[in-house]
């Protein structure tokens, strides 16, 4: 929520940054869906993870492409569709998490460390993981900054569309990866190595 508040504040304060208001609306949904992904993998709901990714990476992108090419929607309408897609993925995730946790037989309130201890551990781990994610993001997107600096906004737009379209191909292999994670995490060393 702090990220969403900052993004909304900048979007409201600076006219040229209005798109950040849409990003602020999507941040809680996107973070929930991403955070719950680990829980889904832990209880073996790999199919739920694959569908969650399909909502945001396949169905939403196809809907956005159709809206832009056929209906010629403006950028703010496209941004609104993106926010709705993130909310749909979070809603789907919440339903799958509830079903998966109930089916796993996990107690509603497990014995163990208190909430404050768990929250502190998660914040520390989350901070370290966020730094690693940020480094990975910069590594994966440094090209955007370079293309923007050397070739300008018009060619950056074309380049970004080409890269985004190419990245859709990842969605062909991701379901296989998620489906194999359960076997890798739960199998013996020999079974895992073979898989």
Image: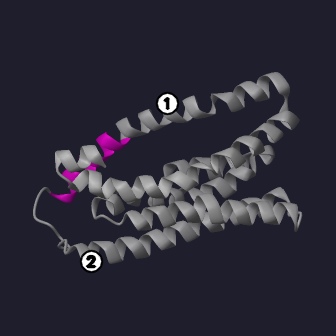
Residue 12 percent across, percent down from the top left: 71, 52
Marker disc for residue 9: none
| Residue 117 drawn in magenta | yes
Residue at horizontal 32%, vertical 60%? 39
Query: Can you tell which quarter of the image residue 41 is in?
Result: bottom left
Q: Which mark is residue 135?
A: 1
Question: Where residue 187 sits: x, y (%)?
Answer: 20, 54
Check whether the beta carbons of the residues at disc 2 and disc 1 lie within 8 A of each other. no
Chief secondary structure of the magenta portion: helix
For image coordinates 36% across by 55% down, the residue present is 180
Of the numbered discs 2 and 1, the one sitting upstream in the chain is 2
Direction from residue 44 to residue 132 in the image, left or right: right
Q: Which residues fall within the magenta stretch?
A: 114-126
- Is residue 51 within the magenta segment? no
Crowdedness near tag 1: few (<14), some (14–19) or many (≥20) residues, C-alpha within 10 Å:
few
Asked which secondary structure carries label 1, the reply is: helix
Residue 143 position (above or below residue 17): above
User: Residue tagged by mark 2?
Assistant: 102
Q: Say which element carries label 2.
A: helix
Residue 31: tell me if it is visible.
Answer: no
Q: Residue furthest top?
A: 150
């Amino acid at each position: 929520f702090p990220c969403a508040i900052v993004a909304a504040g900048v979007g409201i304060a600076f006219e040229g940054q209005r798109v950040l208001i849409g990003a602020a609306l999507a941040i809680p949904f996107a973070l929930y869906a991403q955070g719950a992904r680990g829980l889904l993998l832990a209880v073996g709901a790999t199919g739920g993870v694959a569908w969650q990714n399909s909502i945001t990476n396949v169905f939403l992108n196809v809907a956005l492409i159709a809206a832009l090419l056929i209906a010629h929607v403006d950028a703010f309408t496209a941004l609104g569709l993106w926010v709705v897609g993130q909310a749909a993925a979070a809603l789907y995730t919440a339903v799958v998490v509830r079903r998966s946790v109930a089916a796993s037989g996990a107690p509603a309130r497990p014995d163990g460390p208190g909430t404050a201890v768990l929250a502190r551990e998660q914040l520390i781990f989350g901070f370290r993981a966020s730094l690693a994610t940020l480094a990975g993001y910069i590594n994966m997107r440094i090209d955007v900054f370079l293309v923007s600096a050397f070739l300008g906004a018009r060619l950056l737009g074309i380049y970004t569309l080409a890269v985004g379209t190419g990245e859709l191909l990842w969605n062909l292999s991701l379901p296989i990866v998620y489906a194999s994670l359960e076997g890798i995490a739960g199998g013996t060393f020999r079974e895992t190595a073979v898989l």
